[in-house]
């Protein structure tokens, strides 16, 4: 349980609470996530409606975030000594991994204010610190070396971000399980990794495969 995050997750489900959970594919990290016990029961129609309308995305570690975090931990040279911008940070999993891997500084950006509270709590849980931002376009830093993003291409309308990202950094590292096999001259496919959401939502098999891409300006 967490006194800051429990009231936030209860906007989705009144009896829900968070607990610190290890990540199967990132065993060196923990996150405050929705406790699985609160999701393993039948829901009323009102509860289902509330879950759909008030989904606390930050309270789950999505497949792409887990894959991208472990990729960074396995390849620390990608971030070591660099200033990194984590766009759509959610729980902060990738920002935390970047700091653990030796990034000089990380800016964790998300428009969801509750997600930023989650980031702050998860950073403390993992004994790291990073800067928080709620608006990508208010970030005026001109010395960002790398932009990282996981699961931000869930809608094809968001493919425009592939160009926008280069306004903020000369290199991009991207993981996505929703929009696959996009074509862009500045992005190169790196790898495909099977993963899952934590707690596991038993999603369709197609969403359990995460594609990794590297972009260069």
Image (cartoon, rainbow, N blue to C red):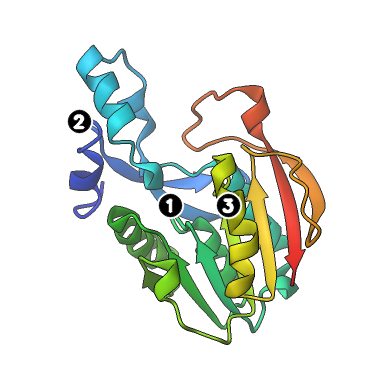
In primary-sequence order, the first of circles 3 and 2 is: 2
Q: How crowded is mark 3: few (under 14 residues within 10 Å), some or many (20 or more)?
A: many
Mark 1 and mark 3 residues within 8 Å of each other at the beta carbon: no
Residue 107 in the image: state x and y as whole percent: 47, 73
> Which residue is rendered at x = 33% and y = 28% of the image?
52
Label 1: which secondary element:
strand
Residue 30 in the image: state x and y as whole percent: 47, 53
Q: Please give left or right for residue 75 compared with residue 79 in the image.
A: right
Question: Would residue 40 be visible to someone looking at this image?
Answer: yes
The answer to whether 122 is drawn above or below residue 195 in the figure is below
- In this view, the residue in front, 3 or 120, is 120
Position of the C terminus, as image quadrant, is bottom right
Label 2: which secondary element:
loop
- In this view, the residue in front, 206 or 98, is 206
Question: Would residue 69 be visible to someone looking at this image?
Answer: no
- In this view, the residue in front, 66 or 86, is 86
Query: Pointer 1: what residue?
Result: 31
Q: Please give left or right for residue 188 compared with residue 69 in the image.
A: right
Query: Pointer 3: what residue?
Result: 150
Mark 3 and mark 2 residues within 8 Å of each other at the beta carbon: no
Query: Pointer 2: what residue?
Result: 15
Q: Residues within 10 Å of mark 1 (few under 14, many from 20)?
A: many
Residue 191 in the image: state x and y as whole percent: 80, 48
In primary-sequence order, the first of circles 1 and 2 is: 2
Residue 74 in the image: state x and y as whole percent: 73, 61
Where, by quadrant of the figure, is residue 178 drawn?
Answer: top right
């Amino acid at each position: 349980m967490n006194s800051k995050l429990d009231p936030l997750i209860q906007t989705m489900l009144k009896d829900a609470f968070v607990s610190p959970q290890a990540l199967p594919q990132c065993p060196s990290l923990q996150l405050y996530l929705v406790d699985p016990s609160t999701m393993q029961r039948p829901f009323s129609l009102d509860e289902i409606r509330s879950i759909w309308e008030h989904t606390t995305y930050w309270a789950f570690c999505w497949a792409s975030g887990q894959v991208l975090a472990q990729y960074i931990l396995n390849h620390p040279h990608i971030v070591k000594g660099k200033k990194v911008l984590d766009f759509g940070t959610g729980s902060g999993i990738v920002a935390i991994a970047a700091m653990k891997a030796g990034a000089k500084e990380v800016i964790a950006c998300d428009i969801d204010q509750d997600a930023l509270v989650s980031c702050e709590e998860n950073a403390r849980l993992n004994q790291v610190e990073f800067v928080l931002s709620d608006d990508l376009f208010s970030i005026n830093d001109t010395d960002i070396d790398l932009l990282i993003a996981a699961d931000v291409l869930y809608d094809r309308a968001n493919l425009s971000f592939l160009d926008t990202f280069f306004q903020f950094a000369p290199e991009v590292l991207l993981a996505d399980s929703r929009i696959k096999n996009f074509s862009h001259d500045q992005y190169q496919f790196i790898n495909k990794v099977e993963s899952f959401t934590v707690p596991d939502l038993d999603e369709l098999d197609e969403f359990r495969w995460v594609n990794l891409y590297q972009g260069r300006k």
